[in-house]
């Protein structure tokens, strides 16, 4: 029988649509299991500051459809220090919190893993990041919504691009991972896609630009961490080298993080939130709950932090075949 009585829940790192749906699921699943829940505001920063708020079922009413996170999120340098984590532990003990659910990315799980080694407070992670770059889960909360947001934006840009016979370089999020660029690129029929996981794409881009002639518009999707450069920088080079193209740039930026979560992200957040409480009750520690082949899995923090999630590079060929 588990000794856990009061669970803290926090959102940490970059915000992602569906985090609220995950908070709701954690709170209601905990209450269903006769556990009390405390919201920890602004991630590990709030843990260090003791910024806690009790949560009951009605506190999470009417949030499943809202983007952002009602608890706020932050990046905390202090939590990286022994002293910062000591303060956080003191606050958790003071509030009688004896387990935590952290909704975030690999950095958040790394912090949780270190903390749990130093202090006897179990953590379970719920993958929440628009980048979908976490090993051990097919999808992360927020990715599907961000993908749909990008597709909608690119469709709009395509309308004006084709009206004016223009080439658009559209930069999307993805510092270390090209999931958003590659999948939205296929969904939008992008003519070329640049992602961090592949080297030598500059040459392929030039080959494409030299070879194509009868397209009325071109959409080049650029993941921000690709190996050729930022959208602005690449566009400037192309304008010099290929003056025949009427080139424009669009950096989608933070709009990719916002908005009401998609049905899939709400569903995923609900399942993972419930699974995180089940895992705690089942005495699981320092694991992330993931979603693989439409089923719940448990992945140790050190595995999801250290292993990298493979992007299916065959999809670049799919995009290429369909762009011609
Ligand atoms: P995203 O993928 O959206 O960036 P993330 O969870 O990876 O989300 P990070 O900024 O990497 O975001 O990490 C969130 C917080 O986790 C950090 O601000 C810090 O407080 C804590 N953290 C990360 N790495 C460590 C570490 N090595 N030791 C202690 N705390 C850490």
Image (cartoon, rainbow, N blue to C red):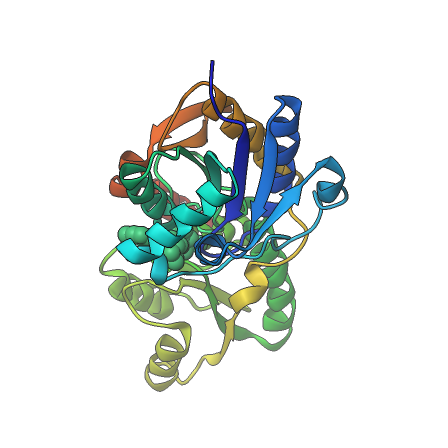
Q: How many marks?
A: 0
> Eyeballing the image, is 256 above or below 247?
above
Q: Residue at x 34, y 63 (%)?
A: 225
> Eyeballing the image, is 154 above or below 239?
above
Q: Residue at x 52, y 43 (%)?
A: 95
Q: Quadrant of residue 112?
A: top left
Q: Quadrant of ligand 1?
A: bottom left
Looking at the image, which is closer to me, 235 or 225?
A: 225
Looking at the image, which is closer to me, 318 or 298?
A: 298
Q: Quadrant of residue 134?
A: top left
- For the C terminus, the image quarter is bottom left
Q: Is residue 195 visible?
A: no
Name of the residue lying farthest toward the front = 94
**Percent x, y for residue 205?**
33, 65
Q: Residue at x 42, y 61 (%)?
A: 75
**Percent x, y for residue 116?**
33, 38
**Percent x, y for residue 25?**
63, 34
* 59 horizontally vs 209: left or right: right
Looking at the image, which is closer to me, 106 or 222?
A: 106
* 113 horizontally vs 232: left or right: left
**Percent x, y for residue 139?**
47, 38
Q: Is residue 224 visible?
A: yes
Looking at the image, which is closer to me, 78 or 91?
A: 91
* 154 horizontally vs 78: left or right: right
């Amino acid at each position: 029988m588990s000794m856990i009585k009061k669970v803290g829940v926090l959102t940490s790192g970059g915000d992602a649509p569906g985090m609220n749906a995950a908070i709701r699921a954690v709170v209601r699943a905990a209450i269903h299991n006769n556990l009390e829940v405390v919201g920890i505001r602004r991630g590990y920063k709030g843990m260090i500051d003791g910024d806690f708020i009790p949560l009951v079922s009605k506190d999470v009413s009417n949030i499943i459809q809202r983007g952002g996170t009602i608890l706020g999120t932050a990046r905390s340098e202090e939590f990286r220090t022994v002293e910062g984590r000591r303060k956080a532990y003191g606050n958790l003990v003071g509030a009688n919190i004896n387990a935590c659910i952290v909704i975030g990315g690999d950095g958040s799980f790394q912090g949780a893993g270190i903390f749990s080694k130093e202090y006897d407070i179990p953590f379970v992670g719920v993958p929440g990041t628009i980048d979908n770059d976490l090993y051990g889960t097919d999808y992360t909360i927020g990715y599907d919504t961000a993908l749909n947001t990008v597709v909608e934006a690119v469709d709009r840009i395509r309308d004006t691009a084709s009206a004016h016979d223009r080439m658009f370089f559209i930069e999307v999020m993805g510092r270390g991972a090209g999931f958003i660029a590659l999948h939205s690129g296929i969904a939008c029929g992008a003519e070329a896609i640049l992602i961090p996981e592949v080297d030598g794409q500059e040459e392929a881009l030039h080959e494409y630009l030299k070879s194509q002639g009868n397209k009325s518009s071109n959409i080049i999707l650029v993941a921000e961490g690709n190996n050729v450069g930022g959208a602005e920088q690449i566009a400037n080079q192309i304008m010099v080298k290929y003056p025949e193209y009427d080139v424009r740039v669009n950096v989608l930026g933070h709009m990719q993080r916002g908005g009401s979560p998609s049905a899939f992200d709400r569903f995923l957040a609900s399942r993972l939130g419930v699974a995180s409480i089940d895992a705690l009750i089942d005495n699981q520690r320092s694991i992330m709950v993931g979603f693989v082949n439409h089923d719940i899995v448990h992945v140790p923090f050190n595995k999801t932090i250290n292993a990298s999630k493979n992007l299916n590079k065959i999809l670049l060929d799919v995009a290429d075949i369909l762009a011609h």
